Image (cartoon, helix red, strand yellow):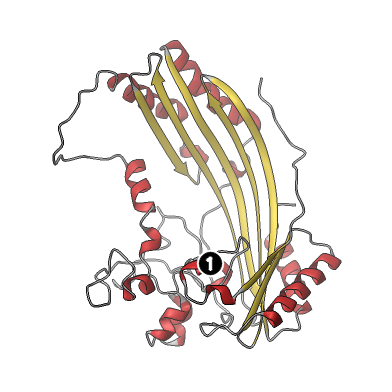
């Protein structure tokens, strides 16, 4: 089972939290169903579906923290992963930047799940590939691309009574089109939550037009030029900057936004749940990701520890944390645990059983 209902997730996580004998326990359950199709040289090369579910358990004895993960959910496995996390916590040195589990929160719902996207079939993926390949073949162009879709859920619970659950869907599409003489190349990309807004026949025309238009490209001499980028290109550039908007990095002079002598020089408005921006309602392992509407302009994202260092109040600490100072199932925190000087003080254990989907759909 890859997509748990809210009640199923709550039942499992409540059981896990109750098993712990530590001072506090936080558990996170995540699952996904991911489908894809890949094509190149005007021919489909691979396709498939991957189902995955993971449980991460984090416990603390005082300031000693341990985390273990597993993807088996029978009673014996749940007991094992909790005890393993506790064992590791007892072995870990104290973390001077330790933050206790977050108090109970009231998370706002977010329309991040679209049933039509979750219901995408292998036949639909094959149609996407065909709608790219056929027009290119007729126009003596060569297409190579990747289409993927996913349905996911995340649920969190802790020993302080906090619980959160969210489902989401996503469609990701990229396609490169080249002229058969390799002189011209075009590209198109789309990333959507609702597949009904995806029009592959229109998008492939964009890549084809770029490929044909660039075949006779002329060299530009070095210099300053005004460039108008399309949304996909702009988003790609900005995405590399996102983890740079971190208060700690800026305050310690490790950010491109640091001021000489310390501090940072950037403010932003936090608009986390506008209708056109569908985002997580809580950060990894529990810190609330945002509220509806724009917040007053403020400095970079502060993890919960950083807000305490800055003298923030408890309410602000728990409601405004951009990223949680906790480790998620893949062993890396939302605010980059490896960047912190005390990252090695957190002991992590992963245990997995390989999962091979019984649904594989080769395309003819």
Q: Position of residue 9 (x, y in %)?
A: 71, 64
Q: Is residue 35 above or below residue 140?
A: below
Q: Is residue 162 visible?
A: yes
Q: Quadrant of residue 93?
A: bottom right
Left or right of 111 in this view: 178: left
Q: Nearer the viewer, residue 315 or 28?
A: 28
Q: Nearer the viewer, residue 345 or 128?
A: 345
Q: Is residue 363 above or below residue 262?
A: above
Q: Nearer the viewer, residue 44 or 96?
A: 96
Q: Is residue 163 above or below residue 126?
A: below
Residue matched to label 1: 333
Q: Nearer the viewer, residue 53 or 250?
A: 250
Q: Quadrant of residue 358?
A: top right
Q: Position of residue 24 (x, y in %)?
A: 67, 83
Q: Position of residue 351 (x, y in %)?
A: 74, 61
Residue at x 34% of width, y 48% of height: 237
Give the position of the C terminus as an image quadrant.
top right
């Amino acid at each position: 089972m890859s997509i748990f209902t809210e009640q199923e997730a709550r039942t499992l996580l409540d059981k896990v939290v109750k098993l712990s004998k530590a001072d506090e326990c936080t558990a996170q359950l995540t699952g996904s169903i991911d489908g894809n199709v890949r094509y190149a040289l005007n021919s489909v090369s691979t396709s498939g579906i991957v189902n995955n579910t993971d449980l991460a358990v984090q416990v603390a004895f005082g300031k000693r923290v341990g985390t273990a993960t597993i993807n088996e959910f029978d009673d014996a496995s749940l007991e094992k992963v909790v005890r393993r996390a506790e064992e590791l916590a007892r072995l870990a040195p104290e973390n001077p930047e330790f933050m206790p589990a977050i108090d109970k929160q009231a998370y706002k719902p977010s329309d991040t799940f679209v049933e039509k996207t979750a219901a995408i079939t292998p036949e639909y993926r094959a149609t996407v590939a065909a709608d790219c390949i056929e027009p290119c073949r007729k126009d003596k162009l060569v297409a190579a691309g990747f289409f993927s879709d996913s349905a996911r859920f995340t649920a969190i619970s802790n020993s302080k009574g906090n619980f959160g659950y969210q489902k989401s869907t996503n469609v990701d599409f990229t396609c490169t089109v080249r002229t058969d003489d390799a002189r011209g190349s075009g590209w198109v990309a789309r990333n959507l939550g609702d597949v009904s807004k995806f029009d592959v026949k229109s998008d492939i025309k964009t890549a084809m037009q770029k490929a044909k238009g660039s075949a006779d490209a002329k060299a530009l001499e070095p210099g300053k030029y005004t460039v108008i980028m399309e949304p996909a290109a702009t988003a790609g550039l900005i995405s590399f900057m996102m983890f740079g908007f971190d208060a700690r990095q800026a305050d310690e002079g490790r950010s491109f936004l640091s001021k000489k002598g310390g501090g940072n020089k950037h403010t932003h408005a936090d608009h986390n749940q506008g209708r056109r921006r569908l985002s997580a309602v809580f950060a990894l392992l529990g810190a609330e990701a945002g509220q509806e509407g724009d917040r007053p302009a403020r400095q970079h994202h502060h993890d919960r520890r950083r807000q305490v260092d800055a003298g923030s109040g408890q309410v602000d600490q728990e409601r405004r944390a951009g990223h949680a100072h906790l480790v998620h199932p893949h062993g890396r925190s939302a605010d980059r645990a490896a960047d912190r000087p005390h990252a090695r003080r957190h002991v992590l254990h992963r245990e997995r059983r390989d999962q091979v989907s019984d649904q594989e759909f080769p395309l003819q």
